[in-house]
Image (spheres, rainbow, N blue to C red):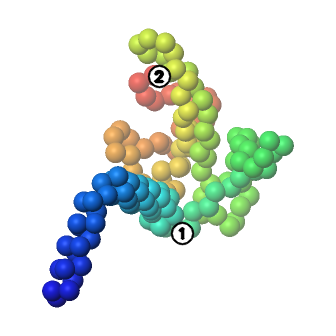
Amino acid sequence: MTNILRDVAYGFRSLRRTPAFTILSLVTIALGIAASTAIFSMVNGALLKPLPYAADDRVIRLQQPTAAGPGGAFSVVEVKDYRGLTQVFEGVAEYPSMPFQFYGKGEPQRVQTGVVSDNFFKLLGVRPVLGRDFGPGEEEIDRPRAGWWA
């Protein structure tokens, strides 16, 4: 035990004699720890943690290839066809992402939004935190709108 204490004391004396090296070493170690923590947090959040809804192992995402690359949007008619013709899936829900102009105080801002079909939350087995869930057929074009904008 005395040898270990003697070695630690010698190490501190050596570090005190070379302050520039000591500071550089500590900064390098701190940056390494911070980078490792940041990478682990991203990998943990994106890959290791289960998705925040029931039966996450049974959820798939359909993508359509386009000339611009993968991830093209499906048309409303295609989604209705998938809903009616498939025997493989329990349900089909839409989640297209689209930009909107947000008008409020000051200059208008372009915001990226996600629009979902009326069965999206039921299919994932989640409930809205505020407000109510969508009713069946609420996404139909001729149906009166419900909400503060109606």
Spot occupied by residue 60 in the image (x, y as percentages of width and height): 62, 61
Relative depth, front residue between 143 and 95 = 95
Hey, which quadrant is residue 131 in on the image?
top left
Relative depth, front residue between 81 and 64 = 64
Q: Is residue 22 left or right of residue 139?
A: left
Q: Residue furthest front?
A: 17
Q: Is residue 18 left or right of residue 39?
A: left
Tag 2, which secondary structure?
Answer: loop
Spot occupied by residue 148 in the image (x, y as percentages of width and height): 41, 24
Relative depth, front residue between 64 and 131 = 64
First in residue order: circle 2 vs circle 1 = 1
Please say whether residue 150 is visible from this viewpoint: yes
Spot occupied by residue 23 in the image (x, y as percentages of width and height): 33, 53
Tag 1, which secondary structure?
Answer: helix
Residue at figure coordinates x 61%, y 34% from the top left? 98
Q: Is residue 61 left or right of residue 45?
A: right
Q: Which residue is mark 2?
A: 150
Q: Is residue 119 left or right of residue 13?
A: right
CA neighbours of label 1 inside 10 A, class few (<14), some (14 to 19), many (20+): few
Give the residue type that dot 1 points to. Answer: Asp
Q: Residue furthest left?
A: 2
Give the residue type that dot 2 points to. Answer: Ala
Question: Residue 83: which numbered mark, if any?
Answer: none
Residue at figure coordinates x 73%, y 44% from the top left? 72
Residue at figure coordinates x 48%, y 50% from the top left? 121
Q: Which residue is mark 1?
A: 57
